[in-house]
Image (cartoon, helix red, strand yellow):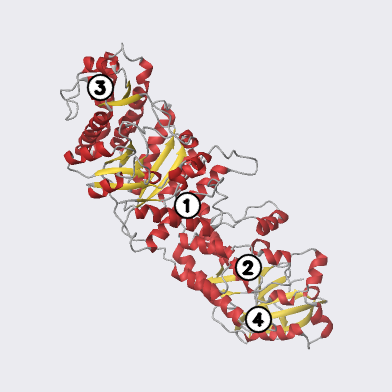
Amino acid sequence: MSIIGKTIKGYKIIEFIDSGGFGSVYKAEKDAIIYAIKIFREDYVLKEYREKGENNRIKREIDIMKSVSHPNLIKYIDNFKEILSGVPSYFLIMEYAEGVNLRKLLNQKSLSEQEAINIFAEILDGVNSLHSIRGENEKTGIIHRDLKPENIIVNNSNIKILDYGISKIIDYTSITSTGEVMGSPRYMSPEQINDSKHIDKRSDIYTLGVILYEMLTNNLPYEYSNLQELYQRIINEPPIPPRRRNIAINNQLENIILRLLEKQPYKRHHSVDELKQAILNTNGVQQVKKYDTSINLYIRLYNEKSAIENFSKKYKEKINVIFPINYRNLTQTKNILPMLHAGNFNILIDPATIRLAYSAQQEVKGLQELPYAPPKFNVVTPQYLSDNQKKQEYVKQVIDEQAKLSPNILVTPFHYVHNTNAPATQRRNPVAEWFDLDIKLIKESVDYKNSINDYKELPLFAGICINSESLLDQTFKADFLNIFSALDCDGYLIYVDNISNATNVTSLYHYIDTLVNLQTFTKKPVIAGRVSPGLGLGLISAGISGFSTGTARFESFYEDLYKEATDAYNMYERYYFPELLGTIAILRKNPVKLKQIFDAIGYCNCHYCNGKQYIDIIKAPNNKLHFLENIHKEIENVRKLPKEDRISYFIERIETAIFNYELLSNVFKSSDYAHLRNWKNIFVELDR
């Protein structure tokens, strides 16, 4: 039977508003003032109130609730019992608040970070007022117990919190007997699920974490198919990281949310005051920056001290180098860094974190000396770095160790996300775990760098390492671009497994397309890690900032590199032929192939080869210097071209190289230069 139009104790019921598990809410009017009335059936009113009459603990609790006065809390006006349609019912009269509840607001729009913070700050003010009121238990104040978006009214960024203390007047015994759930399961803390009668204000603090998570991601922290699964996940499993749902989320805000959602109450913020201070200390506003995307080559160093030093005396521009941090104390490499610091070099330190995920690192002295290397008989895994504090310590050590070597660019810790040592199972996706870990490490690196005055002006590049085949999956490729483009780094150093002359045309196309798109849309420099010089020239012609390669070595990245403790002996030197757009393996002891090529296409006339016999040209110091002069000259040629002409220039270079290979049919099979035809197909497509 409808009660609209009825008057009960002077309150005229004028409109139905909503109903929940324990009662209904109506709009009412009395003395020209609008109120909201919550009506409970008596079987939901606490047994103590029914049995002991007016002089009971619950009456005292209600009187305390009625004394609450705060602009962000709905005011409780009156309460009474009345027979309604023959059913004893309990009436709670409240201030009426204009606006929409937060649930409807979130359904209507996605909140900006600043909008969410503004609303959340007012929610915190209201909850803090509740927690500060001395109730029957002076230590706890009033615990809301049922915070959720439906209980938060928003009106032009002003908020009112509803239903605080309502659970105190509900009979837990009657709920248990009817099978209904006390509270809102999706917003319950682990301790509220386990024992809802014995919780403190930190349960509300957990719930605030769920609400903030939802405000910033439009999702909940857990996916579930039924109530029991939800409870199990809340009690036992970590929440889905907010960054998976909103890659642009401020890292400090994400850390706050993750702390709020800790399983153990002591690990959360201890008070709403503490939480609000943490929220207000976050800074989601970033300065608009311009990034240096000029074309650059990065030489990956090993034991090339004499060659690099010799070349730098002749070459007037800055030389960019990548120095692996684990070489810093090795006998054959430790003298390189002083030379670099004394000369005209830009230094990027490879933190060697990729290698720490493989057992072979235990046999490499330079890796084991790193302060962030895992303990003996361990490797780095997502589980090893599962604790947020451990991630932050790992980041600190990786950045600090680089800084000790005075680099010009810092690199975030990163790992090979398609690590084959951890196969997928029905319940586990290691790729997602590694991917998620490295995203978090990038965000923590940004925060740490910006917190240290000596590091603030240094560019920070995000290290990334993935499998080339993954980019064939359009969803993965889109996620990759969406996620990494949103990160607050200054550039990208990207290693992709199995990019070589043997890479099939489809994989290579998506690799190039991904790198070009990342730089195009972020306007940040992208460096392709460990590629051949010929492909590197193609990449910078297509639009990325740079590439790294060795001095006629380190021309590709593949995972097996890190499954071995040492490099196998190589009986070949690789000699760079600009005319063939690549390096060719030449036997050190019998370099007759070098002579055959020279006889067909002409001898090199660079500063280091001109006038020398082929037997001397191929010797290691000369070969490296020849490479350095020629590759820098070629990069300068690309730099001078207008951007719109660079791809067509590279296509011409490919065609010339194919022509020269065909002249050398006595030396090469057609399969030896099939990659050039693939390159041409790709770059013609890119040039459309």
The amino acid pointed to by label 1 is Tyr
**Can you name the residue that lies furthest to the left here?**
611
Q: Which residue is mark 4?
A: 139
Q: Which residue is mark 3?
A: 656
Q: Earlier in the sequence, mark 3 or mark 2?
A: 2
Picture coordinates of residue 48, whole percent (x, y): 81, 80
Do residues under tags 2 and 4 come within 8 Å of each other at their CB atoms?
Answer: no
Relative to the observer, which residue lies in front, 299 or 496? 299
Which residue is at a point 56% across and 45% down the rendered structure image?
A: 377
Picture coordinates of residue 132, whole percent (x, y): 59, 81
Q: Which residue is mark 2?
A: 265
Q: Quote the CA–CA distance across marks 3 and 2.
A: 69 Å
Q: Which of the 4 image quadrants contains residue 649?
A: top left
Q: Earlier in the sequence, mark 2 or mark 1?
A: 2
The amino acid pointed to by label 4 is Lys
Q: Which residue is mark 1?
A: 372
Q: Earlier in the sequence, mark 2 or mark 4?
A: 4
